[in-house]
Amino acid sequence: MSELPTGTVTFLFTDIEGSTRLLHELGDAYADALAEHRRVLREAFARHGGVEVDTQGDAFFVAFARAKDAVAAAAEGQRALDGGPICVRIGLHTGEPLVTDEGYVGIDVHRASRIAGVAHGGQIVLSERTRVVADAGAVTDLGRHRLKDLAEAERLFQIGAEAFPPLRSLNATNLPIQPEPLIGRARELADTLALLETARLVTLTGAGGSGKTRLALQAAAELVDHFKDGVFWVSLAAVNEPELVLPTIAATLGAKDELADFVDEKWLLLLLDNLEQVLGCANDVAALLRGCPNLKLLVTSRAPLRISGEQEYEVPPLPESDAVELFSQRARRAKPRFAPDRHVLEICQRLDGLPLALELAAARVRLLSAQQILDRLGESLTLLTSGARDLPPRQRTLLATIEWSYELLDEAEKQLFARMAVFVGSFDLEAAGAVCDADLDRLEGLVDQSLLRRTEDNRFFMLETIRAFAVDRLRHRAESDQVYARHAGYFVDLAEAADRELHRPAQQASLTAFKSNISNLRAALSWSLRHDSEAAGRLTGATAQFWFIDGGWSEGEERADAVLGRGGLSQSVHERALFCSALLSVALQREAAQQRAEDLLRTAKESGSLWGMGRALMLLGWQAGLSGEHERANDLFGECLVAARAAGDGWLSGVATHDLADVALNQGRYDEARRLLAESVEIARSRADDDMAARSIADLGQASLRLGHDEAAIRLFRESLRLGREIGAPDVVIADLTGLSAATAETEPSQAARILGAADASLAEIGVDRQPTEQVTHDEAVATLRRQLGEERLASELEAGAALSSEEAVEAALALD
């Protein structure tokens, strides 16, 4: 090994993402792929002066004397791997480590390793120290993140602007990174933070465009380290139905059960943004606060909720000096050398210090001088604010500013601006092109004029105040109905395409497509219900599995029933809408669930649809199993499998086979269960369905445990655990932790008890029940551990396990013999 660099050193760590999954997918070819990955990375690192400190399995630890070389090596390495089967995450940090005979010692080594650990495959993440020392140019600020075992939060950056999921750090927050610092508002920020110290509900009120959201986001960001269970932003701008407020909060938090049960005693701060159009949710919000003693809410709204305990804080306009600074900052986006003059102060005075109005006006400095803006704006304000006397003065000022900005658009821009109103929430470039005939240049033009916003992940949206104005303009255009029809058609097609991939390797991408477009899907369904029943039915059928997987059971059922009640559907579309209703009714255990499944079976038989018959038999089998009728469930799943095979339905064949295995497990037919589960695993792998594979392997572990094959059970639970962690399936991880605890309770009781404590805590957090066989395994593990440890020590170990993070629990479980 070359001599290790000393003094200021930059450390580079790499790790392969999804190595276990790759091993299964590539088989014997994995060894060659791993060797090729090592070769290209070693060449890149050596070319830039890197010294290989250590290599363990599929991970590199490399040191560089110059930070700039480390960044260049990381970028070259990623480029060399691009397009291949292996994706690596890379972390960089610069420090002054101690060098001993055994190598580097010090916190900087651990920090670099932890930074790599929170990255994603294909991503290069570096510390602020490395960014500064390397003078790295094209980076994306990822904000401050808490890293495992490190006390201080670290500000992290990403090389390049490619979109990746949030870092896997300890921060429990989804707050968006603000591109620029908050201007002014020092007193308002201090007041808001002070109110949140004592009040559990603080509502920031004020006119549209007064800066409520920006102030609230800053306050929430200041409190990230004060709420151990997280600080979360819930955007309600696209929600128009009060009954959807709690489901939207639940979806943001990832709650699968009742929201109050999920939050329970967690120390959480929720920022509920843009609540004014759904103030009818006030009673639901009050009940949530009553049931969750450690929850605090920060709300932005044009009006207070008027419930007990609410502290209202009216956000004032910006004072003149801050208004001038904001105008100048936004103006420099359009004209980098812009310098404010006396006309800017007059503009700020005329616009009442409203941040949104200032941004709209400042966007025009590319073409107009400050004096020209003042002259034209002054005329518009005088004319437009003379009407609408029923509106508050500041609201009239804002609307007049929006109108003025709109009138400066050319006719093509006006048409596009109006068309954009059809989108609810955010949308991407493809949707804009398909629905509105927009291209990137035209969208960027509206962004430059502050009439459209762009998100970090390259989606677009309108602020609700501006969108309301655009909706009014679209309403008065002859093409209005056509635009809404194109919007509905596009999102019906999108949902059907995503649905086809929900049980394939692209499942996560499909779920993301549904989640990121949920507001537009709701809007498309609402419009279709009034104007196009067939489109409404298609959209209902396409969203059935999404609602089921994501936990939106009640909403999905209600929307499906509305579509079915409307009627006017073709046979196949009616069948799929009926499946949606029946599936979610079974999930909710409604009294009508059995009847709906039977209706689906009858309808499918009448039309000769194997697709419908198979799914109806699956649902009826689930119903029988839930009622303890195992023989009947077995018969129904058998019929389901026959229908699935006849239809060539690989997904349903795998589900039916797995369901038959579950019945066998519950009835003690463990050898038969193992045979069926092995078949289910084979089907899942042939379809690259990691979710089904993980669940089937976990149940194989249960069967092996029942048969007394503890070593085989441990191996299977570990395999499923790694896969469950990679695909993000918490219920699978919990089942595997429970199984591993039971399998090692005799030999490693202390560690097994901790693993079980972690599993129990995770189960309570996601709010689901164990399957019957898993519950038996859990109870047997507890009995064995009680005998091995005694009641007092068992309780202590369970408590220690409950305090582990999910990742710590998984690592501890994988270390069990």
Image (tube, grey):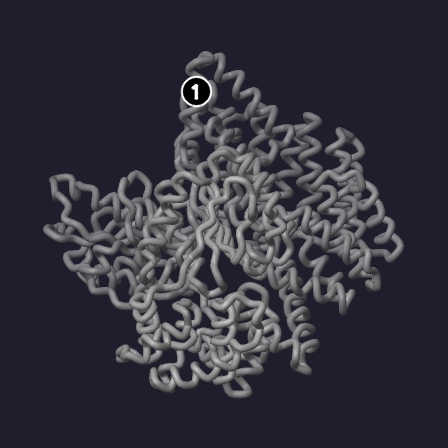
Q: Quadrant of residue 708?
A: top right
Q: Which of these two is toward me, 511 or 452? A: 452
Secondary structure found at label 1:
helix
Amino acid type at mark 1: Pro
Residue 240 x %, y %: 62, 58
- Horizontally, residue 505 falls left or right of residue 615, namely left
Which residue extends farthest right? 606
Which residue sits at x=63%, y=50%?
A: 280
Which residue sits at x=19%, y=59%?
A: 67
Q: Which of these two is toward me, 414 or 683? A: 414
Which residue sits at x=34%, y=72%?
A: 327
Question: Could you classify mark 1 by the number of other residues whose Cα lies within 10 Å: few (under 14), some (14-19), or many (20 or more)?
Answer: many
- Horizontally, residue 185 falls left or right of residue 408, namely left
Q: Which of these two is toward me, 44 or 679? A: 44
Residue 204 x %, y %: 46, 53
Residue 432 x %, y %: 56, 74
Q: Is residue 163 visible?
A: yes
Read off the residue under disc 1: 749
- Horizontally, residue 255 falls left or right of residue 193, namely right
Q: Is residue 83 above or below residue 90?
A: below
Q: Is residue 698 above or below residue 210?
A: above
Q: Which of these two is toward me, 66 or 42? A: 66
Residue 297 x %, y %: 48, 45
